[in-house]
Image (tube, helix red, strand yellow):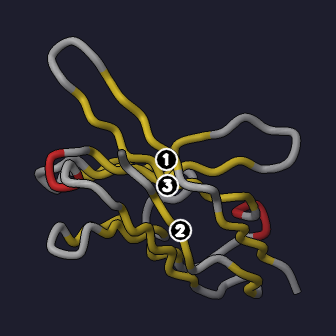
Amino acid sequence: QVQLVESGGGLVQPGGSLRLSCAASGSIFSIAAMGWYRQAPGKQRELVASITNRGNTNYADSVKGRFTISRDNAKNTVYLQMNSLKPEDKAVYYCNLAYITTTSRYDYWGQGTQVTVSN
């Protein structure tokens, strides 16, 4: 069973930075793709950034150049460094682990961590 525990959210002023962490239990972390999603009030959950088990990354256009996703397989942890935060980045951020086989995809989610960008 996989469990994901996020941390690092909070309140930050516009232009500030936060680093989110997601620690995973279980033995499949190193072979799984990891992602950060967010959901703002009244909006659908959207992909923010993802990283494959080989370290290839992908970002939403709205965060390119400001956010960086990384992973430490030795610690079973994925990070999201968020710089130059904007009020529109306010959302609940969710960690996702995707275990993908040739025939199936298994998704696991964390409980979410709130990020608020405000004066």
Q: Earlier in the sequence, mark 1 or mark 3?
A: 1
Which numbered disc, 1 or 3, marks the residue closer to the eye?
3
Which numbered disc, 2 or 1, marks the residue closer to the eye?
2
Residue 112, given in percent of the width and then of the height, sits at 64, 58
| Residue 101 seen anywhere in this rendered image of the structure | yes
How far apart marks 2 and 1 lie (CA) works out to 20 Å
Amino acid type indicated by mark 1: Ala
Residue 99, given in percent of the width and then of the height, sits at 27, 36
Residue 26, given in percent of the width and then of the height, sits at 27, 55
Q: Is residue 51 left or right of residue 56?
A: right
Q: Earlier in the sequence, mark 2 or mark 1?
A: 2
Q: Is residue 75 left or right of residue 62?
A: left
Q: Residues within 10 Å of mark 3 (few under 14, many from 20)?
A: many
Under circle 2, the secondary element is strand
Res. 47 mark: none
Q: Is residue 105 left or right of residue 7?
A: left
- Please, is residue 66 above or below residue 42 in the view? below
Residue at the spot 46% in from the left edge and 58% down from the top edge: 4
- The residue pinned by badge 3 equals 95
How far apart marks 1 and 3 lie (CA) works out to 15 Å
**Are the two marked residues, 2 and 3, in contact with CB atoms closer than 8 angstroms?**
yes
Amino acid type indicated by mark 3: Cys
Amino acid type indicated by mark 2: Glu
Residue 18, given in percent of the width and then of the height, sits at 57, 82
Under circle 1, the secondary element is loop
Of residues 97 and 10, the one drawn nearer to the viewer in this rendering: 97
Q: Residue furthest left?
A: 54
Under circle 3, the secondary element is strand
- The residue pinned by badge 1 equals 60
- The residue pinned by badge 2 equals 6
